[in-house]
Amino acid sequence: MGRITVSELHKFLFDGLPVRGAIVRLTDAWQEILQRRAVNTSTGPYPLPVQEMLGEMTAAGVLMQSNIKFNGALVFQISGDGPLKLAVTEVLTNLSVRSTVTMIGDLPADATLTDMVNVHGKGRCAITLDPKDKQPGQQPYQGVVPLVDVDGQPLESMAAILQQYMRQSEQLDTVLVLAANDKVAAGLIVQRMPIKGEANLAAGAQNTEEVDQIGLNEEYNRIAHLAASLTRDELLNLDVETILHRLFWEEKLLRFVPEDGEGGPHFACTCSRERVGNMLRSLGQEESDSILEEQGMIEVGCEFCGQQYRFDAVDVAHLFTERGNDPPASNLVQ
Ligand SMILES: [Zn+2]
């Protein structure tokens, strides 16, 4: 058996310069996302172009969440007007991540991003910051941009879409390199730091001083140029130390402690077999039995991660026996 690699996030600053960066490599977390979908008998695995797109979104979601001071869920959505209806990545402050795609049609194996989500130019990219402890009446912050450039031409990569989002919605110069295959979803971000205030997605929008700085900081431009030279192959296949050395060996990097293992990016979803069982209980025995009669088995797929839960006649009978009606021990009040 080969070494099990864990997902990792590496953040860094360029000493004395208004520039920061991060590299994420999702391995086990990304493979879990793919695996849940692959074994779902009603959806099957993601087609290759969708896999690549969702992997890039997932890596980018972690990079964006790690770059802001915010306690809550960062939800990154692409809503499409083609066969791919919706792609969602959610990353919490603790770097737990889940992603999913809803499709309504078939895709050619060589489908471009435009073929998937922007057939009629109506695709949208939305980033929502949903705070954990909302005040009464408080709305989540949301930024939305179309999937076209300033001249109305379709943007052909996830990195291009997000760079445009950062410029339009947050007034921040950003370079992103993203790549994904069936083992790794990875990303590099380099960003000019806001002139003042917290480095927060939601703060830039009101700050007109930032607008005047776009594209003008020479030090940022030099580093951005280096970052953009990273190829997708290098990003997928080289370890983080090698990448940073190749790109920035002439720069003075200040490294943060790498985040991996439990404190690093990891897959998590709120679904469980117990929750689905409780849902079936509230549906009632009659209804559950009639589904069983019709389909031989009750299959419930989690809409956030694709995990499929199966209940056969024995499982369902157990749910509705006296024993099954007891609340789970962990919920008993002492
Ligand atoms: Zn789930």
Image (cartoon, rainbow, N blue to C red):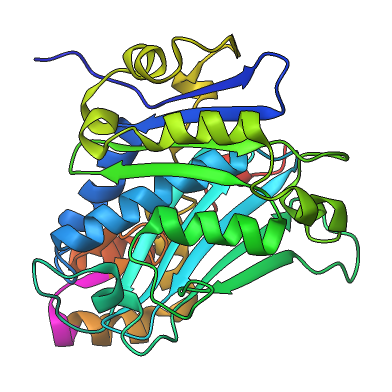
Seen at 39% across and 79% down, the residue is 80
Residue 68 falls in which quadrant of the image?
A: top right
Does residue 89 appear in the picture of this structure?
yes
97 over 7 or under it: above or below: below
Q: Quadrant of the N terminus?
A: top left
Residue 296 painted magenta = yes
Q: Based on the displayed image, in which of its 4 quarters is residue 281 positioned?
A: bottom left
Q: Position of residue 271 (x, y in %)?
A: 44, 54
Q: Is residue 10 above or below residue 268?
A: above
Closest to the observer, 85 or 178: 178
1 or 218, nearer to the observer: 218
Relative image position of residue 207 (x, y in whole percent): 86, 55
- Whether residue 51 is situated above or below residue 279 in the rendered picture: above
Q: Is residue 214 left or right of residue 310?
A: right
Q: Is residue 51 left or right of residue 89?
A: left
Q: Is residue 109 left or right of residue 281?
A: left
Membership of 142 in magenta stretch: no
- The magenta span reads 293-299
Q: Quadrant of the C terminus?
A: top right
**In this view of the protein, can residue 322 be seen by the observer?**
no
- For the point 45% across and 63% down, which residue is it? 88
